[in-house]
Image (cartoon, rainbow, N blue to C red):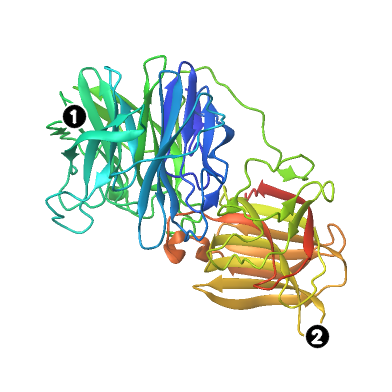
Amino acid sequence: MSTFRNPILPGFYPDPSICRVGDDYYMVTSTFEYYPGVPIFHSKDLVHWQQLGHVLDRPSQLNLDGTPCSRGIYAPTIRYANGVFYMITTFVVSATGERRNFFVTADNPAGPWSDPFWLQGAPGIDPSLFFDEDGKAYYTGNRMPPAGQQYPKHMEIWLQELDLETKQLVGPTFSLWDGALKGIHAQEGPHLYRINGYYYLIIAEGGTGHTHSVTIARSETLTGPYEVGKTNPILTHRHLGQAYGIVNVGHADIVETQNGEWWMVCLASRPYGGHYRNMGRETFLVPFIWEEGWPVVNPGKGIVELELRRPDLPQHRWSSKPACDHFDAPELDQRWSFLRTPRGDFWSLTERPGHLRLRLKPDSITKFENPSFVGRRQQHFSFAVRTSVAFTPGSPHEAAGLVLLQNNDFQFRLEISMNESSQTILRLVRRENGIETVLASCKLHADRVYLKVEALEQSLRFDYAEIAEAWTLLCDHVDATILSADKAGGFVGAYIGLFAESNGGQCKNQADFDYFEYVELDTN
């Protein structure tokens, strides 16, 4: 039997949504405070995915100024109807919780996508679109029940027609369902389907933590009443314990292949070194069948596995991405992200050919700002990152180097700076719960410094060199668990990136990075 390995999108790619157009599959995931927003992927076989770009790749589409960590873009849904692609999502504006729902459209999934159509009168989060057989479009999302919440975080799924001409919701609203198990909170992530004469409503319940789950209901009419599936939850791992290798499974979307198979994409996490999930919530794939009008996920087992039989589709691999970015291309690779919408001309690939130049900004990675930072997702338990940077600090307030980032208050910075004696130094800073500790430091003498970090699961080692490959240990056996949301809070996974900042001061200095290499480490 031919098999594949989960996750199909490793690293911080939560809340997957999928659609099929002919023989092509398209998928999107959440991005929260990172920019560009909503990566879009293409596959021919459901296993191998190639990123086409990002749906929200212009400041006119996505203004993340001041957005707190783990706010921003939540739970996108992608759908296709009548030659048009639709992506609908929630923008969580601030820590106080304002939610604004919008959608964008495109004729080509690779873009360009339209500017947002903001929906009035659309409370709640996790919107989805459903196109019925009569051509009408409908919005589903979650909201507080009109009659009031019966228990904490009690929500319901609601529906309203979407006028595709005016791009607004019209007509009455309908309460569809408030979940399979009373007392299980956070009914969200709804997706509505028309299959074999029934309307099926699949939702997430139990929050995004250990009790996450997928539940289902159905109705012969669009607005209900909805019959609750007796086998609910149709997918969860909460009964397997926190030590199981795949946890917090939920937030699913389904697709039928051209060969009549049914598959589900969902989010889950892989804890390691204890119940720590540094990579956040990732995208997994699992098969299901229909029995007596209800789904049976991974028949005989009922769980998501790391290795599963391959879909009955021709295998289609894409060209592999290089492990090292030499910054020779005219644009940044699609794997790179900014923190919030980039403001100002703070980075360049042309001013020093073959280098990424980052100008120092007063904005800091320790605040809800747009720092001079580019990063990529951690995607493996064990990895090695190397870079080379040419940087001469002009004051003790200036710093540039590598950062392992969970959020503004939980991070490691391997940074070149200046001490009070005007000597150039390298220091390793751990920022935990907003408190900074210098774990190690040394004086530097060269204008170019090579930096390296190796992660053996939850143990970090930091090295530097002033001559290429002549590595010197700076600090070893550093606990990496602060890079997990289990300690830091929030919903995002860890990033590894490059930064340059002046810590609130104005300066004209810059740091030039020659390359950035990320590879998985073999720990055998």
Q: Position of residue 361 (x, y in %)?
A: 68, 64
Residue 32 point in image, percent of width and height: 47, 51
Q: Residue at x 59, y 59 (%)?
A: 370
Query: Which image quadrant for residue 321?
Result: top right
Judge left or right: residue 210 versus residue 275.
left
Percent position (x, y) of residue 335? 62, 43
Label 1 packing within 10 angstroms: few (<14), some (14-19), many (20+): many
Q: Secondary structure at mark 2?
A: loop
- Give the residue at x 67% y 56%: 344
Report which quarter residue 85 is drawn in. top left
Amino acid type at mark 2: Ser
| Residues tagged 2 and 1 counted as in contact (Cβ below 8 A) | no
What residue sits right under mark 1 in the picture? Answer: 218
Q: Foreground residue, 199 or 142? A: 142
Residue 298 in view in this figure: no
Left or right: where does residue 380 sit relative to residue 428?
left
Q: Residue at x 20, y 53 (%)?
A: 154
- Mark 2 → mark 1, Cα distance in angstroms: 71 Å
Residue 85 vs 304, above or below: the answer is: above
Give whichever of 322, 519 is nearer the camera.
322
Q: Is residue 388 above or below residue 331?
A: below
In the displayed structure, does residue 101 sit left or right of residue 141?
A: right
* Horizontal side, residue 337 vs residue 67: left or right: right
At label 2, counting other C-alpha atoms closer than 10 Å, the crowd grade (few under 14, some 14-19, many 20 or more) is few
Which residue corresponds to mark 2? Answer: 421
Residue 163, image x and y in percent?
A: 31, 29
Q: Inspect the image, locate mark 1, and give the three-letter code of the amino acid beneath it.
A: Arg
